[in-house]
Image: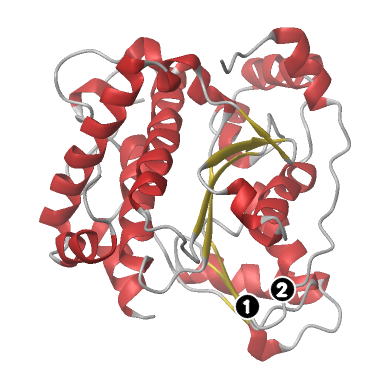
Amino acid sequence: MGKLGFWSFLSEQGRDLPLSRESVDGKTIVIAGANVGIGFEASTHFANKKPSLLIATCRDTVKCERTLEILCGRCAGIRPASLDSWPLELSSFENVRSFVDKPIYHRTPDDWEIMLQVNYLSIALLSILLLPHLLRSATLSSLGHYLGGSMLTGSRAISAEKFGVSGASRYNLSKMLQVAFMRELTARLPSPTPLVVTAVDPGFCHSSLQRVLEKYWFLRMVLAFVKWLLRARTSEMGSRNLVFAAVATNAQDLHGKYMSSCEVVEECDYLLSAEGKAFSERLWWETIEVLSKVDGRVSQIVSTYLPAR
């Protein structure tokens, strides 16, 4: 069963991750959240591999323009036509729909808690709407999913009210929902399938996720100590997990798996239990119900490509 141990975590954090050498010739790569942290470093790695097209998404056009400028400066010899940046705001379902059509407790304008929508619902919506066009998908998850099972209460698998707790707990639960959704999506895809779905944990990294805390000098000092104690990786090192999963030649071995440090590892005990499996199936149907109200294409895509088990 998958377990999270402190010493094994420290050992894993200290590993020097391999940089994938696989080719991405003729492929289109889409990176969500490409302007900072792990997303930006992964975009740099992919851009240097010279794909047919790299789409680096950011929250607004200003960030898109800045990201393109920096990527072009860091990636020597890249063809301008092979690099583009599109706005993608995951806290807005309408923005996710528009993107696909182009080819503390906060609620979003869609009336969902922002972390639930950004980390789970919009990722699920993006995955389903892109399903007819995808060849491979690596979803960025987190070791926090090991801690998410303790928050599950009530009959509904997802609800905005369930996310009215501490930020760390919301984060852990949203990441566990990602892994559960990945498992359910994989189970419903036809076999064989050209689509490879993987949940990727980049590890504990220096990234802009902590930028709110770093505004305060005391919290900044505490966070710096925690990062030192837990051997935080650079965003560049963490991004290697995402690149490895996206271009690995043994794609089918990664299908439906959870990866950490460029290796397949077991998910949390809860998701592997009978209760967790029942929760995951309930989560799937509740997610489809929610997203079908956002975009009518969801139901059609599910019925066409993802028959019930």
Q: Quadrant of the C terminus?
A: top left
Q: Quarter of the image holding residue 199?
A: top right
Residue 220, picture quadrant: top right
Q: Position of residue 185 (x, y in %)?
A: 36, 47
Q: Is residue 47 above or below residue 36?
A: below
CB contact under 8 Å: marks 2 and 1: yes
Q: Nearer the viewer, residue 138 or 174?
A: 138
Q: Nearer the viewer, residue 36 or 141?
A: 141
From the viewer's side, name the closer residue of 300 and 87.
300
Residue behind mark 2: 24
Q: Amino acid at mark 1?
A: Lys
Calculate the distance from the C-alpha at mark 2 to the C-alpha at mark 1: 5 Å
Split into 4 quadrants, where in the image is the N terminus?
top right
Total marks placed: 2
Identify the residue at horizontal 53%, vertical 32% (top origin): 212
Residue 104 spot, x, y in % from top left: 36, 25
Locate residue 143 relative to residue 105 in the image: left or right.
right
Q: Which residue: 31% across, 45% down?
A: 121
Give, as a three-letter code, the residue at label 2.
Val
Residue drawn at point x = 70 percent, y = 34 percent: 205
In-image side of 94 versus 45 (left or right): left
Q: Mark 1 highlights which residue?
A: 27
**Residue 258 image point, x, y percent:** 57, 36
Image height of 45 relative to 256, above or below: below
